[in-house]
Image (spheres, rainbow, N blue to C red):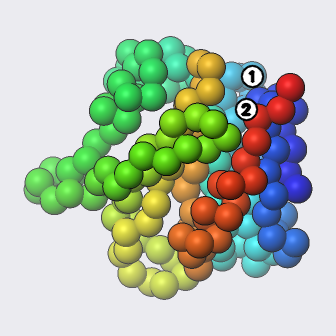
Amino acid sequence: MYKNEKYGFELMFPNDWTSTISPYSTATTGKESSFILGNILGISGISFTINQLGSEALGSIYRSAKNLDQYTNLLVRKDEKGNIFRKFVKEITVSGRRALWFEVYQWEVDKQSFMWVPAIYFQDQNNIYEINPSGSITVSLLNQILSTFKFIE
């Protein structure tokens, strides 16, 4: 089990996984956090990024967002050639919160090719959560892990 007391949530993940702070984490600001849950080899896992709405760390474009819909509407969906690389798939629920499931066309190192992979966004209070699986994470495993995500008091 992974428990994050700073942001008040917990979730279950496979026994052979570990948790690490992302090298891209801005947790030192006390407002944003990034961590990775994954297998020991580091090939497959799920990255979690938590950003505070209105934070300077979001940059000038995303800082204007006041809620989940405004934030996801600001996400770039096409490259400079007009190719779609982020698309909305469906609405789901994560720990009782409305969540938006997108797919992102990105390079997957373990498969050495570009693939459509999920990116899930949801909001709790003033925080936007972004969840990105990588490697050989199946949709079934991702759904199983998301079903265990619970906000705690």
Which quadrant of the view contains residue 29? Answer: top right
**Does residue 20 appear anywhere in the picture?**
no
> At 44% from the left edge and 51% from the top edge, which residue is drawn?
101
Is residue 53 shown above or below 78? above
Residue type (three-letter) at the residue carrying disc 2:
Ala
Which residue occupies 11% across, 54% down?
A: 82
- Three-letter amino acid code at the position of disc 1: Gly
What is the quadrant of the N terminus in the image? bottom right
**How many numbered tags mark residues here?**
2
The secondary structure type at the circle numbered 1 is loop
Q: Is residue 37 left or right of residue 82?
A: right
Residue placed under numbered mark 1 in the picture: 30
Residue under the image location 75 percent in, 22 percent down: 30
Left or right, residue 102 beside residue 123: left
Where is residue 124? Give x, y as percent. Answer: 62, 27
Q: Residue 15 at what x, y percent from top left?
A: 87, 72
Residue at the spot of label 2: 27
Please state if 8 lies on the left or on the right of 115 as rendered.
right
The residue at the far bottom in this view is 111
Residue 22 location, x and y as percent?
A: 70, 50
Mark 2 and mark 1: Cα distance apart in space: 5 Å
- Which image quarter holds the C terminus? top right
Mark 2 and mark 1 in contact? Answer it, CB < 8 Å: yes
